[in-house]
Image (cartoon, rainbow, N blue to C red):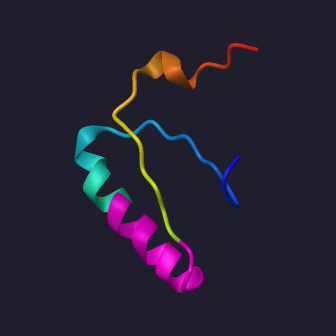
Amino acid sequence: MDGLAELALALSTDQVADFEAAAEELAEQAHPWARVSLVGPMAMYDFVPTD
């Protein structure tokens, strides 16, 4: 893990813009050096553990 937390979510395409705005606002409120990195879209099978 490269940061404080990692989170995987499955969002519909109509939820992405609202989620991005909320995540950026949360990072700004948390601390000046906080940042959010978003990756996607990803296939649903990428959320299944392989271990």
* Along the line of sight, the residue nearer the viewer: 4 or 20: 4
Return the x and y of residue 2 as percentages of the image width and height: 67, 52
Spot the residue most to the right: 51
The correct choice, above or below, for 7 with respect to 17 in the image is above
- Magenta stretch contains residue 21: yes
Residue sitting at x 39%, y 28% = 42
**What is the count of numbered marks?**
0
Residue sitting at x 50%, y 41% = 9
Residue sitting at x 50%, y 16% = 45
Q: Which residues are magenta?
A: 20-34
Which secondary structure type mostly characterizes the magenta part of the structure?
helix
Return the x and y of residue 17 as percentages of the image width and height: 26, 57
Spot the residue most to the left: 14
> Based on the displayed image, in which of its 4 quarters is residue 11 positioned?
top left
Return the x and y of residue 16 as percentages of the image width and height: 30, 50
Return the x and y of residue 49 as percentages of the image width and height: 67, 19
